[in-house]
Amino acid sequence: MKQSDRDKLVRLYRKMSENTSSVCANECKRRGACCDSIYCEIAIEWAKTQYGVMLTRSQHHTLPLMGEHGCTAEPHLRPTCTVHQCRINGLGFYPHDLPLTKKYFRLRDAIRRTENLVALENVQDSNLLSARMRYE
């Protein structure tokens, strides 16, 4: 992954986290109700395979990445959690907030495009490596 793509993804996921966490903190009936241990496990594996980061498990009784002030993983290391927002998943929009809905989808589309570019780079790098190995 190019460093510029990595930096862009980190920024995009951080913006998305700011977008979704503010809604969750102010509007959700039960804060953190969407969290589940399986998503922590997915994030732990993602961080390791995609970024080479070993996430530290917390002492939380059910959520391995839940700390005193919320999730301990950076937003780009927990992409499934970062883009989740109950209103978007349930209704497809934020009721009575078209600007926030548009912002969410612009960010999600930018993340998707950048992730696709990274995936394509990884495939190309893999193909180049295979080609080099055949000729050596």
Image: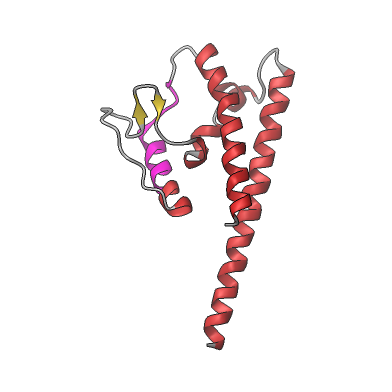
Query: Which image quadrant for residue 118?
Result: bottom right
**Where is residue 4 drawn, in percent x and y?**
63, 51
Camera-nearest residue between 103 and 2 = 2
Residue drawn at point x = 57 percent, y = 18 percent: 23
Q: Is residue 119 left or right of residue 28?
A: right
Q: Is residue 100 left or right of residue 90?
A: right
Q: Is residue 60 left or right of residue 135?
A: left
Camera-nearest residue between 37 and 54 = 54
Q: Quadrant of the N terminus?
A: bottom right
**Where is residue 113 drawn, in percent x and y?**
68, 47
Q: Which residues are magenta?
A: 32-45
Specify the principal SS of the magenta part.
helix
Residue drawn at point x = 70 percent, y = 27 percent: 103
Position above or below: 115 against 75:
below
Camera-nearest residue between 132 and 33 = 132
Q: Is residue 36 magenta?
A: yes
**Where is residue 81 drawn, in percent x and y?**
49, 33
Q: Is residue 70 magenta?
A: no
Residue drawn at point x = 61 percent, y = 25 percent: 88
Position above or below: 125 against 92:
below
